[in-house]
Image (tube, helix red, strand yellow):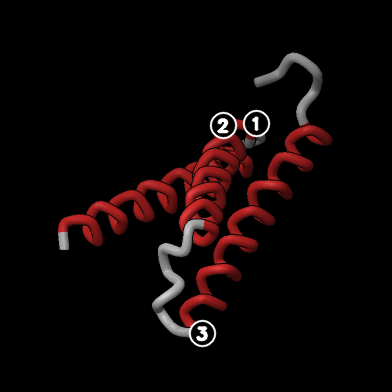
Amino acid sequence: MLIARLLGAAYLALVIGYYAGLKGLARGESPLPVMHMGIASNGFAAALLAYFGATGAWSSWGFGANVFMWLSTVGAFSIAASLVRFRLRYAPTGES
C-alpha cells in the first residue's frame, strides 16, 4: 500500500508541475523546465518498463496485462521522444 501511495504522490506532483507549466506558458514564460520534467519522468518510466518487460517481470500476468504493459512502455517512450524533438526545435541554442 505504501508504494501505491508514493506513486500517487508522484503523479500528483507531476500534475501540479504540468499545471504550473501551462499557467506559465499563458504568461509568456518558457516551457522548458516543464518539458525537462516530462522528458525525465516519461524517459525513466519507459526505460524501467522496458527493462522489466525484457527481463520477464510481468510475463506471468496474462496476455491482456502484457499487452497493456508493453503499450504503456511504448506510450511513455513516445511522449519522452516527442518532448525531446519539440525541445530541440523550440529552444534556442544555449537555453536550458
Residue position for label 2: 33
Query: In the drawing, what numbered circle is on residue 63?
Result: 3
Q: Quadrant of the N terminus?
A: bottom left
Please identify the quarter of the rendering in which residue 7 is found. bottom left
Q: Quadrant of the C terminus?
A: top right
First of labels 3, 1 by sequence position:
1
In percent of width and height, residue 93 lies at: 80, 18
Q: Secondary structure at mark 2?
A: helix
Density class for disc 1 (Cα within 10 Å; few <14, some 14-19, many ≥20) is: some
Residue position for label 1: 30
Residue 89 located left or right of residue 43: right
- Disc 1 to disc 2, how far (Cα)? 7 Å
Density class for disc 2 (Cα within 10 Å; few <14, some 14-19, many ≥20) is: few
Disc 3 residue type?
Phe
In percent of width and height, residue 54 lies at: 54, 58
First of labels 2, 3 by sequence position:
2
Q: Secondary structure at mark 3?
A: helix
Q: Nearer the viewer, mark 3 or mark 1?
A: 3
- Disc 3 to disc 1, how far (Cα)? 43 Å
Q: What residue is at 64 percent from the left and 53 percent from the top?
A: 77
Q: What residue is at 79 percent from the left and 33 percent from the top?
A: 88
Placement of 88 over or under 67, stated as above or below: above
Residue 54 located left or right of residue 9: right
In percent of width and height, residue 33 lies at: 56, 31
Q: Nearer the viewer, mark 1 or mark 2?
A: 2
- Disc 2 to disc 3, how far (Cα)? 38 Å
